[in-house]
Image (cartoon, helix red, strand yellow):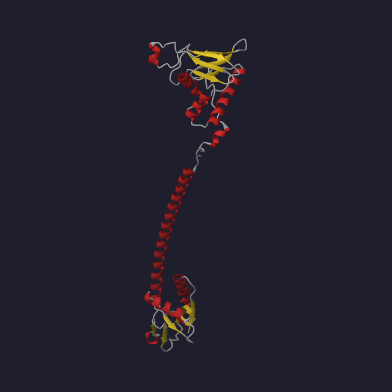
Amino acid sequence: MKLSSLFAEYLIQNKKLTLPGIGSFSLDETILKTPEQETAGIRIVPGSVQFIPDKKIKPDDAFIEFISKETGKIKPLATSDLESYLELGMQLININKPFILEGVGTLQKNGQNQLEFIQGDAFAGQPEIQSKKGGKFFEEAPHPEENLFRTPPKIKSNTRTLVIILLLLAGIAIIVWVAYYFYNQSNKSDSDANTSTETIQAIQEVKQDTTVNQAIDITARVDASKDSVTVIAAPQLNTDPGSFKLILEIANQKRALKRYAELKEYGHKVQLETPDSVNFKIYIPVTAPLSDSIRHRDSLSRFFGRKVWIETN
């Protein structure tokens, strides 16, 4: 409960109110309420409050106890709040401003520079007292020591807003990543389709221009369990001017066997030979005019994506 509303409450309950440095108020019970005032809930009848100014009057311990109980503050804080409140009220009076006691009346100086009391017209349960010029007349100021006994106020933060922003950014990032992934998959599919087309064209081209002499083919036997190759000597290729080899790769035994098996599985007419059992040569024999060798080489280079060499007999 606000301190400003306790003056009238205490006066009604105890019929007397003492304010140190100001004076005392008393409530006259002989003045009865009219039926209209009873119906309106009037608690302090106009003209029933008497004020006696007395600057030397001492604080009322019972009133301080009442403030402590109603506000939930310890007595030192209640005393300090009352002193601060009355001190500010006297400052208003000294500058010729009215000091309003909510629910009781107004204190101010008259033309003889004396303190006088003017009771309000009628005060109901908990009226909202304001100055004639409008606005709040007095706002209770918190005492510095009060912070020692109060729970610190909660500090509002933008944590919720920050979390929402982070979730939105994460959602956008996921959407972008998914779109990028499917875009790459689409490009990859197109690339694979183009490669397949080039492969078919290259194989057809090689089939059209290549006639392998079966009599001089090399028979290669691949032993997967032993990772070895047995090259059976065969007669040399026909040394006609219209035959040559397209060397796909020269590698060691392990690499050559693996690559040879892969190309065979894909249906390529490749052959394998080694002059020293160390370096293995994977090639495609071609029977065609030597003038077409460069065209065949470039075609296979584009197809396999790597350099192909020409070797003539």
Residue 132 seen anywhere in this rendered image of the structure? no
Foreground residue among 147 and 290 = 147
Residue 166 seen anywhere in this rendered image of the structure? yes
Left or right of 211? Residue 142 is right
Left or right of 222? Residue 86 is right
**In the figure, residue 58 lies in which quadrant?**
top right
Residue at position x 46%, y 46% from top? 163
Foreground residue among 251 and 77 = 77
Foreground residue among 252 and 226 = 226
Q: Where residue 270 sits in the image (x, y, percent)?
A: 41, 79
Q: Is residue 65 above or below residue 202?
A: above
Q: Where residue 242 sits in the image (x, y, percent)?
A: 44, 82
**In the figure, residue 77 lies in which quadrant?**
top right
Q: Where residue 90 sits in the image (x, y, percent)?
A: 59, 20
Residue at position x 50%, y 27% from top? 65
Q: Where residue 310 sits in the image (x, y, percent)?
A: 49, 78
State the count of labels. Answer: 0
Residue at position x 43%, y 59% from top? 184
Q: Is residue 308 above or below residue 64?
A: below
Q: Is residue 232 above or below residue 119?
A: below
